[in-house]
Every structure is written in structure tokens, then in C-alpha cells.
């Protein structure tokens, strides 16, 4: 298993991975919209885990000069609990730290306790915040 930056040839693999991991995501989070947008902005912060030529994991990071963020953390169902997710997070953290990022934030749906356990195992703390958001563009 190798962790490396996303390449255009990874698109189909990442799309399948996200369809499996995030079946209920809104259209703007799907690969067709989110990957071109990411490649247009901080393209070096999209990582994949690859095994035998197949994409088995992904993570997207962003740094705005103040905080780093993680998104699209996913490992193919049949490859979980083998350390792939941990390796992806650590690679994204390394890339963020290299940009001067001091702190990483991320959001987990309140119902997704397993993922909260994954991140707390990796040293992340659940912080007492209310998460707010507003779409600035119409739905695609
Ligand atoms: C979360 C996810 C990326 C973890 O990937 P992974 O490759 O299985 O993670 P790791 O093997 O590196 O796990 C490291 C540790 O995290 C914890 N952990 C991982 N998955 C867990 C789960 N489902 N329940 C409880 N703890 C879990 C364990 O302590 C694990 O160590 P262990 O296997 O030695 O006990 C994967 O389960 C996934 O893709 N989930 C669906 C997508 C998703 O919801 N993403 C998050 C969006 S916010």
C-alpha cells in the first residue's frame, strides 16, 4: 500500500470509493464536482492510498493560512482496520504542517460515532463547538 498525491488516472477509483463511503452525500460533494474544484485549488492536498494499482483510500486537506481542514476521509470497506486511514491522515497532516499549519479541524456527522472514535484514537479531541455553514452558490 502506498500513499501518494492524487493523479488524474485515479478519478474512477476515487469516485467509486466515495460512492461506497458517502452514498448520501449531496451533489456538490461528489467526485465529479469536488475533484475538479480541488485540482483548481491546492491540488497537492488531495491524497490517495493505492494497492495493486487500485485506489483504496482518500483524504482531502485544505489550508487557509489560519487552520487546516480534512475532508473526504475514506477507506474501501474491505481494506479497513489495517492502518490505511491512519496513514492517510498522517500524510495530510505532514503536508499541512509543511505549509505552516498549526492546527487541523474537521467535521464528523454526529451520528458517525465510529469515525469519531477513529479520530480520537489518532489524537484528535472533540471540541465544544457548534458547527455552522451556509451555501454561497446555488446547488449545481
Ligand atoms: C474512518 C475510516 C476512514 C477509518 O479507516 P481505517 O483504515 O479503517 O482506519 P485505521 O485502520 O487506520 O484505524 C485506526 C484506529 O482507529 C479506530 N477505528 C477505526 N475504525 C473504527 C471503527 N469503525 N470503530 C471504532 N474505532 C475505529 C481503531 O482504534 C483503529 O485501530 P485498531 O484497528 O488497531 O483498533 C473508515 O472507517 C471509513 O472510510 N469510514 C467510512 C467513511 C467515513 O465515514 N469517513 C469520515 C467522514 S467524516
Image (spheres, grey):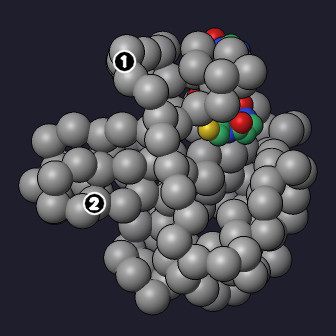
Horizontal side of 133 relative to 138 (left or right) equals left
- Vertical arrangement, residue 131 with respect to residue 42, above or below: above
Say which residue label 1 marks.
127
The answer to whether residue 20 is seen in the rendering is no
Query: Which quadrant of the frame does ligand 1 lie within?
Result: top right
Say which residue label 2 marks.
63
Q: Tag 2, which secondary structure?
A: strand
CB at disc 2 and ligand 1 closer than 8 Å: no
Q: Residue at x 59, y 85 (%)?
A: 36
Tell which residue pokes out farthest to the left in this image: 100
The tally of labels here is 2
Label 2 neighbour load within 10 Å: few <14, some 14-19, many 20+? some
Give the quadrant of residue 105.
top left
Horizontal side of 2 relative to 9 (left or right) equals left
- Vertical arrangement, residue 100 with respect to residue 27, above or below: above
Q: Tag 1, which secondary structure?
A: loop
**Horizontal and vertical percent for residue 138?**
66, 78
The answer to whether residue 118 is seen in the rendering is yes
**Horizontal and vertical percent for residue 50?**
66, 60
Report how far apart the C-alphas of labels 2 and 1 lie in the structure. Answer: 19 Å
Horizontal side of 114 relative to 96 (left or right) equals right
2 or 1: tag closer to the N-terminus = 2
> Where's the C terminus, which quadrant?
bottom right
The mark closer to the camera, 2 or 1, is 1
Amino acid at each position: 500500500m502506498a500513499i501518494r498525491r492524487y493523479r488524474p488516472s485515479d478519478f474512477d477509483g476515487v469516485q467509486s470509493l466515495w460512492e461506497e463511503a458517502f452514498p448520501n452525500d449531496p451533489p456538490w460533494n461528489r467526485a465529479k464536482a469536488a475533484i475538479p474544484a480541488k485540482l483548481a485549488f491546492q491540488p497537492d492536498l488531495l491524497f490517495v492510498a493505492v494497492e495493486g494499482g487500485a485506489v483504496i483510500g482518500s483524504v482531502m486537506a485544505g489550508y487557509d493560512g489560519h487552520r487546516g481542514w480534512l475532508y473526504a476521509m475514506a477507506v474501501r470497506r474491505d481494506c479497513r482496520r489495517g492502518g490505511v486511514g491512519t496513514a492517510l491522515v498522517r500524510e495530510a497532516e505532514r503536508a499541512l504542517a509543511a505549509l505552516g499549519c498549526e492546527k487541523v479541524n474537521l467535521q464528523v456527522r454526529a451520528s458517525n460515532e465510529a469515525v469519531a472514535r477513529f479520530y480520537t484514537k489518532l489524537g484528535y479531541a472533540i471540541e465544544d463547538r457548534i458547527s455552522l455553514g451556509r451555501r454561497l452558490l446555488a446547488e449545481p
